[in-house]
Image: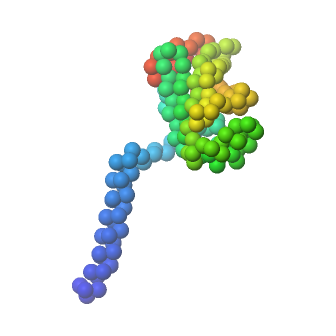
């Protein structure tokens, strides 16, 4: 009886060890398990103060990822006190080609980019008529400048996502203040 259980226990032990090694490897590579928010695919609303709210970098990343019409591998955003929002997005070249967003001249340039491309953009933001407006300062994909029509389309989509987010939070911004890591919006 003991000899019959030995191979089964050895297999179970081996599987458990492999799973543990995979989890440890994932942690060491900097990919912690992601938390699932109550509304899958939508960033959660921050706590709102009486007269305003802060739009932090993490919320901004979620909004940008939601607004982009292509799958995103990785996204980082930096809100600086110098009144700029810098965003770096890692996307697959294939996803860009299949999206239909990329105009002819840039489509040819995409053929020479690596399989995973970094998209970079820098924006300034302002508030007008209770809405956040974005103005693109620069945008590139893998070091290649992004055409104006694509920049305009993506900027409008991201601004719409931010304004929809604020509307859901019951916020009509009138003033915007810049800090490192957050935008302070006041009503």
Task: Residue at 45%, 19% (x, y): give it.
Answer: 180
Examine the rendered structure and indicate whether residue 44 appears above or below residue 3.
above
Asked whether residue 56 is in view, the answer is no
Say which quadrant the N terminus sits in: bottom left
Provide residue 25's location: percent of width, then percent of height.
36, 53
Asked whether residue 183 is in view, the answer is yes
Camera-side residue of 54 and 38: 54
Say which quadrant the C terminus sits in: top right
Query: Looking at this rendering, what residue extends furthest in the bottom direction?
Result: 1
- Colour scheme of the picture: rainbow
Task: Residue at 58%, 33% (x, y): give it.
Answer: 143
Provide residue 132's location: percent of width, then percent of height.
63, 19
- The quadrant holding residue 8 is bottom left
Camera-side residue of 21 and 96: 96
Task: Residue at 31%, 64% (x, y): give it.
Answer: 17
Examine the rendered structure and indicate whether residue 68 appears above or below residue 123.
below
Q: Is residue 123 left or right of residue 14?
A: right
Provide residue 4's location: percent of width, then percent of height.
29, 86
Examine the rendered structure and indicate whether residue 9 appears above or below residue 110.
below
- The quadrant holding residue 136 is top right
Task: Residue at 61%, 20% (x, y): give it.
Answer: 137
Examine the rendered structure and indicate whether residue 121 appears above or below residue 180.
below
Query: Looking at this rendering, what residue extends furthest in the left direction?
Result: 2
Provide residue 121's location: percent of width, then percent of height.
59, 28
């Amino acid at each position: 009886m003991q000899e019959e259980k030995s191979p089964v226990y050895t297999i179970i032990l081996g599987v458990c060890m492999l799973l543990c090694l995979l989890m440890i490897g994932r942690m060491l590579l900097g990919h912690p398990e992601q938390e699932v928010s109550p509304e899958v695919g939508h960033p959660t609303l921050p706590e709102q103060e009486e007269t305003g709210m802060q739009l932090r970098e993490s919320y901004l990343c979620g909004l940008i990822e939601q607004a982009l019409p292509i799958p995103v591998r990785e996204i980082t955003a930096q809100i600086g006190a110098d009144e700029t929002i810098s965003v770096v997005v890692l996307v697959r070249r294939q996803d860009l080609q299949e999206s239909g967003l990329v105009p002819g001249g840039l489509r040819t340039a995409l053929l020479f980019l690596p399989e995973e491309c970094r998209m970079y953009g820098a924006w300034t933001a302002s508030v007008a008529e209770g809405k956040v407006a974005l103005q693109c300062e620069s945008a590139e994909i893998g070091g290649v400048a992004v055409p104006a029509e694509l920049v305009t389309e993506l900027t409008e989509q991201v601004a719409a996502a931010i304004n929809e987010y604020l509307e859901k939070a019951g916020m009509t911004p009138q003033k915007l203040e810049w800090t490192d890591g957050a935008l302070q919006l006041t009503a």
